């Protein structure tokens, strides 16, 4: 009898140990929150002169590591997200600019494998809630074909300008389909609620949650209750003077664009707080990495005023520029007990590095031919095995623009059809605002970086982004 009792106790202890051991071996959850057109200078922990309070983001930075020289994939929406999803720079990516249409040239192809697909194949439940931008429901780039078990939100950037729409898209029955929405509901609320549902439904297994939120992208519109937080008792704006925006193109009228923009940033901050608090409430803090960043620099559309809000911080330029203000974005990574708290990391990394970083973080295979490198060791206070020799961007609206950084040096190239090229050189260590073009006095450095710029790109496979005519 005693022996039987001992066997039972032993079995219970072994089972308890096995359960505990399995729990410690659980793959970590990843939450990647992507703001839309949020400037580096719009987050107070990155810019103490910011006029808009961001308490939840500041707390996230205090509990994690902030990267002060992190770059977006591009200076506009779709190509930046392509770099994030595929690990390629604009010198090699399929989607190198904003494009839409039934020809599918603005969508990912069947052979373009995303980080979500790789995580999904490694046992992760994957969900995306917000703006996709890399393929409509009929294309090969539709969310259900690109690694997502769940999706709810917008498929393209034009539709995402409307915060009170009559339809969004969702994965239903394994396919991405259009669904009706209540036009009195603010879509940011609908999207965040779906993300909360996803976390609750998948709390007992490893999950990847991608939240490409739409705020504070134009149009500048928020519910009255949120706007009132940034109005005085008489209804006037707390951010005078206001210049009303009259309805134009995709963007509706806004009498108080300063107050509306502040409310949108504040809404974003509150939504980040909602997600963090839910993770804590569910006891998932020790199993979850939270990443927060923005898809590119601040916009000046629909009445937005990046100069007033110092949205680019100390940097020159905004969205659609390849100066630092257009591509340098805040990155915060939080994982209690794993990522150093209160640390500031100044080494240069970019969107194309996220895929291999997630690969190393989760034990997911990473393809060898991508441009990205893993910075996962930095998240535990170590030095990466390999760092970039240089970083490269390419953009074409109103002519071709290219930029390349190597260390503190930065070369920017401008080329319009039928016109000579223009080269600008800056030293980011001594001139973070890119105010002094020193190309004329540093011919050898210009030559070196120009050669790397040619090395960093191949002709675009996608005919929509064939810019060879510009070079003539």
Image (tube, helix red, strand yellow):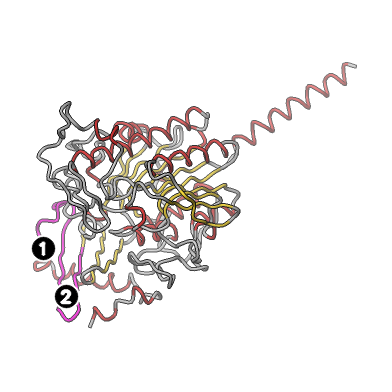
**For residue 108, above or below residue 188:** below
Asked if residue 76 lies in the magenta stretch, the reply is no
Question: Quarter of the image containing the N terminus?
Answer: top right
Q: Secondary structure of the magenta portion, mostly?
A: loop
Left/right placement of residue 198 relative to residue 346 reads: right
The residue lying toward the viewer, choosing from 460 and 456, is 460
Q: Are marks 2 and 1 in contact (CB under 8 Å)?
A: no
Which residue bears the numbered disc 1? 438
Q: Which residue is mark 2?
A: 421
- Quadrant where the C terminus sits is bottom left
Q: Residue at x 23, y 38 (%)?
A: 262
Label placed on residue 385: none
Nearer to the camera, 123 or 152 = 152
Which of discs 2 and 1 lies nearer the camera? The answer is: 2
Viewer-nearest residue: 387 or 174: 174
Instruction: Say whether disc 2 or disc 1 marks the residue closer to the N-terminus.
Output: 2
- Residue 161's x, y, as percent? 32, 53
Q: Quadrant of residue 10?
A: top right
**Residue located farthest toward the right when viewing the structure as drawn:** 1
Total residue callouts:
2
Task: Identify the residue at image location x=31%, y=61%.
Answer: 391
> Which corner quadrant of the image does residue 264 belong to?
top left
| Relative to 133, residue 455 above or below | below
Rendering quarter of residue 84? bottom left
The answer to whether residue 414 is magenta is yes
- Give residue 95's position: percent from left, percent from top: 38, 67
Magenta residues, start to end: 411-438
Query: Looking at this rendering, what residue extends furthest in the bottom direction?
Result: 472
Spatial CA distance of label 2 from label 1 is 16 Å
């Amino acid at each position: 009898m005693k022996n039987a009792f001992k066997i039972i106790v032993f079995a219970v202890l072994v089972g308890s140990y096995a359960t505990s051991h399995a729990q410690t071996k659980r793959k970590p959850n990843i939450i990647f929150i992507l703001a839309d057109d949020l400037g580096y200078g719009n987050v107070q922990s990155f810019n103490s002169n910011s006029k808009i309070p961001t308490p939840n983001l500041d707390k996230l930075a205090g509990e994690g590591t902030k990267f002060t020289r992190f770059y977006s994939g591009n200076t506009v929406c779709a190509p930046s997200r392509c770099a994030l999803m595929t690990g390629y720079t604009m010198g090699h990516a399929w989607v190198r600019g904003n494009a839409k249409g039934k020809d599918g040239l603005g969508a990912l192809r069947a052979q373009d494998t995303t980080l979500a697909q790789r995580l999904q194949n490694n046992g992760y439940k994957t969900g995306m809630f917000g703006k996709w931008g890399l393929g409509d429901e009929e294309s090969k780039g539709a969310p259900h074909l690109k690694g997502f078990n769940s999706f709810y939100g917008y498929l393209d950037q034009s539709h995402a300008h409307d915060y009170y729409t009559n339809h969004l898209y969702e994965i239903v029955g394994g396919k991405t389909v259009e669904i009706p929405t209540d036009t009195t509901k603010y879509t940011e609320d609908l999207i965040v609620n779906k993300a909360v549902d996803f976390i609750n439904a998948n709390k007992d297994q490893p999950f990847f949650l991608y939240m490409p939120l739409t705020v504070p992208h134009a149009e500048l519109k928020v519910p009255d209750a949120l706007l009132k937080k940034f109005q005085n008792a008489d209804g006037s704006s707390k951010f005078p003077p206001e210049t009303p925006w009259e309805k134009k193109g995709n963007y509706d009228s806004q009498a108080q664009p300063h107050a509306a923009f502040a409310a949108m940033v504040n809404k974003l901050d509150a939504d980040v707080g909602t997600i963090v608090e839910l993770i804590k409430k569910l006891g998932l803090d020790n199993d979850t990495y939270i990443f927060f960043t923005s898809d590119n620099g601040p916009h000046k559309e629909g009445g937005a005023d990046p100069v007033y809000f110092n949205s680019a911080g100390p940097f020159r330029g905004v969205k659609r520029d390849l100066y630092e203000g257009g591509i340098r974005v805040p990155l915060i990574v939080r994982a209690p007990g794993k990522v150093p708290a209160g640390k500031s990391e100044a080494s240069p990394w970019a969107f194309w590095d996220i895929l291999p970083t997630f690969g190393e973080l989760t034990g997911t295979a990473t393809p060898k031919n991508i441009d990205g490198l893993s910075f996962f060791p930095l998240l535990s206070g170590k030095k990466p095995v390999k760092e970039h020799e240089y970083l490269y961007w390419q953009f074409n609206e109103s002519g071709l623009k290219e930029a390349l950084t190597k260390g503190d040096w930065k070369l920017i190239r401008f080329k319009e059809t039928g016109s000579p090229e223009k080269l600008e050189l800056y030293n980011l260590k001594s001139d973070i605002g890119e105010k002094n073009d020193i190309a004329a006095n540093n011919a050898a450095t210009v030559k070196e970086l120009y050669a790397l710029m040619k090395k960093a790109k191949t002709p675009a496979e996608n005919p929509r982004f064939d810019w060879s005519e510009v070079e003539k």
